[in-house]
Image: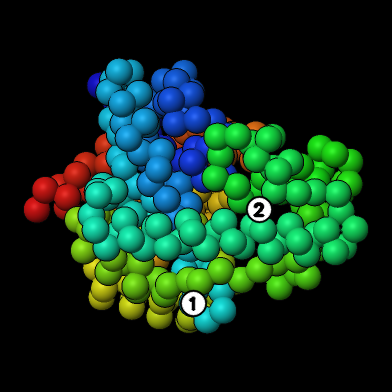
Amino acid sequence: MTDTRIMDMHVHSSASDGTFSPTALLAEAKKAGLRAMALTDHDTMDGVAEAAKAAKELDIEFIPGAEFSTDYLECEIHVLGYYLSPEYPRLRDKLEEFRNFRATRNIRMVERLQEEGFSISMEQLAEKFPDSVITRAHISTLLVETGQVADKRTVFAEYLGENCRCYIQRPKITPVEAVLLIREAGGLAVLAHPVMYDLAESDLKQMVLEMKEAGMCGIEAIYSENSDEDERKYRELADSFGLLVSGGSDFHGANKPDIQLGVGKGNLHIPYAMLEPFQKLRIS
């Protein structure tokens, strides 16, 4: 009998830049028919406890995780950590450091937008997104919904994207440092969405080699933005390094309205059976 169970290993809640609370997110996962789901908010695990409670009530296997922002050859690289303990001291301290800087960074970006003539304030953002960790996604939403910019793509292309005039750089760690931290905290490290990186193939392979040597166990070869050719390419990359294949939609709710849980843009199929080798690695 064919196993039709599916999962999603890359999902965001309102604890970072998603629009669903962790509880509402698990309700959506149930509707989508997910057997398992990983919560991988950006540089935070604030939503994990709430999500774990909701997952238990809904009988969904839950993987506590996070998505770490790192830097390699001046390219922003994301590293997924699965089965992380939010209470591990050094991990907790590093995430707290990221969170504290994010608050200061938001103020500075809003000030730059004000200097550009936009009507925006931290008070407006807090009022509109009362239960969220404010990110660039929230700032762009406010600018679009108040009619000051045509769309979110324009906000990032002209103002808030990396190297744009209102962008504030944030402290980053290297991909290897993220892998080491994830492993130290008892987790499993996976390279997120390699299709999104502007790296030469030789540089990508060198980075993957360095991350594997540090303890990375997988590559997210199944992803919403992949073409069939991309998926084949990254599956082969994972295989060539003896790494596992992971898959995720990168669901953000209304902040990425064309992406749905479990199926992405309708192009995803992430079988639950794919989780088994990760489970075995976690136990070993």
Which of the 4 quarters of the picture holds residue 244? bottom left
The three-letter code of the residue at mark 1 reads: Tyr
Tags 2 and 1 in contact by the CB under 8 Å rule? no
Q: Secondary structure at mark 2?
A: helix
* Mark 2 and mark 1: Cα distance apart in space: 21 Å
Which of the 4 quarters of the picture holds residue 107? bottom right
Asked if 265 appears above or below 284 in the picture, the reply is: above
Residue 213 lies, in percent from the top left, at: 25, 75
Which class describes the residues within 10 Å of circle 2: few (<14), some (14-19), or many (20+)? some
The three-letter code of the residue at mark 2 reads: Arg
Q: Is residue 185 left or right of residue 253?
A: left
In the picture, the quarter occupied by the N terminus is top left
The structure residue drawn at horizontal position 40% and vertical position 57%, both measured from the top left corner, is 96
Q: Which mark is residue 72?
A: 1
In this view of the protein, which residue sits in the foreground, 223 or 176? 176
Residue 193 lies, in percent from the top left, at: 49, 57
- The residue indicated by pointer 2 is 136
Closer to the chain start, of discs 2 and 1, is 1
Q: Is residue 49 left or right of residue 75?
A: left
In this view of the protein, which residue sits in the foreground, 87 or 271? 87
The structure residue drawn at horizontal position 85% and vertical position 64%, both measured from the top left corner, is 115
